[in-house]
Image (cartoon, rainbow, N blue to C red):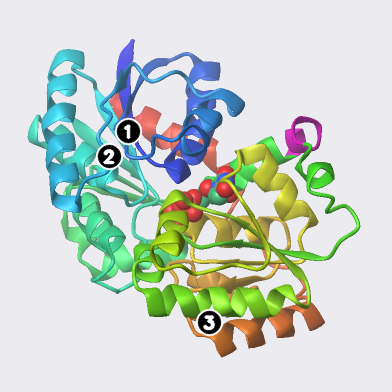
């Protein structure tokens, strides 16, 4: 049986990998081993997803975290290489745009192991984002580039991928599968709406965690000011990423809405179902808002998921207090019709078939 090694490290990767791992287990044609780099390590940022989403237990946990980007990527590269030399997989699968993604792809490629990149081709065109560097470099060395959108496919074509020895395919976005599958289970598996008494209450779901928003007190302060002002109209529920919590403490910034610890996926899906709108700088949450037919205010200067903005389902507001407030007020007034399908269906199966055909060669 051919062997796949999946390299995961951060919350959004667990959520995407859960879909593909389930299909790999159901089909039983390949074995899968998971390497967890340890990038996200808190119980509520990591373990909870493995438990709730039935993701196979990682065979290796490298426990690399809490250090700078260069050190983190370097240590991951070294340790992933050692594991891959022992495991000798036929394919390595990496997801998204974190340091774990880049280290995993590079370690594999240098050992001559084929690499499949799920969520290839996304670009923010902002080279100061660590994620943008990780994406570009991972794409360039991957053998199978699985693009979630036409825009992602076009980005790769514009970068000359037709001339490279790599297969570039449009698959759609795998997060649609996770929202559909786990969303059908979440009403049974989560009691968060009752626990927070949100059943009959208008509320806004917010998440903020990107480095460019958290690490500068002026920027984080401007976003929190917006959330505080909006909270007087409609309660803002804010599951706090550990980095954001640490920075709020460091800069002595306060929040007047309902701050909670990071929640598991079933809780998140229930919050998405019941909220009126989403404010976020997360990539994944922008699409999950759309899948749940909720408008989204993007607290960033740009988005990789530009089709959401073009369709009127999301609006870019940056980290400016007034822009954020205006965009929220507009969406609380008029909710768009979510009448366009943007990201495909049964994407996990398409991705699995592409991987199977690569492994059949
Ligand atoms: N998420 C979650 N609990 C939380 C916050 C986020 O389950 O408290 C999920 C969210 O629904 C989405 C994913 O984590 O699926 C997004 O991860 P994150 O925002 O960390 O990363 P990004 O998508 O920006 O790469």
Q: Nearer the viewer, residue 335 or 119?
A: 335
Q: Is residue 138 above or below residue 256?
A: above
Residue 186 magenta = yes
Mark 1 secondary-structure assignment: loop
> Mark 3 or mark 2, which is nearer to you?
2
Q: Nearer the viewer, residue 88 or 132?
A: 132
Between the residue at mark 3 and the residue at mark 2, the CA separation in whole angstroms equals: 31 Å
Can the viewer see residue 325 in this picture?
Answer: yes
Structural crowding at the residue carrying mark 2, measured as other residues with C-alpha within 10 Å and reported as few (<14), some (14–19) or many (≥20): some
CA gap, disc 3 to disc 1? Answer: 32 Å
- Please name the residue that numbered disc 3 is placed on: 317
Q: Which residues are magenta?
A: 184-190
Q: Secondary structure at mark 2?
A: loop
Tags 1 and 2 in contact by the CB under 8 Å rule? Answer: yes
Q: Is mark 2 within 8 Å of ligand 1?
A: no
Q: Residues within 10 Å of mark 3 (few under 14, many from 20)?
A: many
Residue 181 placement (x, y as % from top left): 67, 36
x and y percentages locating residue 326 in the rendered image: 65, 88
Residue 65 got which mark? Answer: 2
Q: Which residue is mark 1?
A: 38
């Amino acid at each position: 049986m051919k062997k796949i090694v999946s390299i995961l490290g951060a919350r959004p990767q667990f959520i995407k990998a859960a879909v593909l791992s389930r299909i790999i287990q159901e089909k039983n044609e390949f074995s899968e081993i998971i390497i967890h780099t340890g990038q996200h390590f808190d119980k509520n940022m990591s373990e909870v997803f493995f438990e709730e989403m039935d993701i196979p237990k990682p065979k290796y946990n490298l426990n690399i975290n809490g250090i700078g980007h260069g050190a983190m990527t370097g240590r991951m590269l070294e340790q992933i290489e050692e594991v891959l030399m022992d495991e000798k997989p036929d394919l390595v699968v990496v997801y998204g745009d974190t340091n774990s993604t880049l280290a995993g792809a590079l370690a594999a490629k240098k050992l001559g192991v084929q690499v499949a990149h799920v969520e290839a081709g996304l670009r923010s065109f902002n080279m100061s984002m660590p994620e943008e560097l990780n994406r570009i470099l991972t794409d360039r060395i991957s053998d199978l580039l699985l693009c979630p959108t036409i825009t992602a496919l076009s980005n790769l074509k514009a970068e000359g991928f037709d001339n490279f020895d790599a297969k570039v395919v449009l698959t759609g976005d795998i997060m649609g599968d996770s929202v559909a599958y786990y969303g059908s289970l979440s009403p049974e598996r989560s009691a968060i709406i009752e626990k927070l008494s949100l059943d009959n209450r208008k509320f806004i779901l917010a998440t903020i965690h990107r480095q460019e928003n958290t690490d500068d007190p002026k920027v984080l302060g401007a976003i929190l000011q917006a959330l505080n002002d909006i909270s007087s109209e409609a309660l803002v529920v804010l599951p706090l990423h550990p980095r954001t919590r640490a920075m709020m403490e460091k800069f002595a910034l306060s929040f007047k809405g309902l701050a909670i610890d990071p929640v598991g996926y079933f809780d998140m899906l229930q919050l998405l179902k019941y909220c009126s709108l989403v404010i976020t700088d997360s990539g994944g949450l922008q699409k999950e808002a759309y899948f749940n037919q909720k408008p989204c205010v993007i607290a960033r200067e740009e988005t990789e998921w530009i089709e959401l903005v073009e369709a009127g389902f999301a609006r870019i507001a940056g980290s400016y207090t007034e822009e954020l407030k205006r965009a929220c007020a507009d969406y609380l007034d008029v909710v768009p019709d979510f009448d366009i399908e943007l990201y495909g269906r049964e994407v996990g199966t398409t991705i699995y078939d592409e991987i199977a055909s690569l492994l059949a060669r």
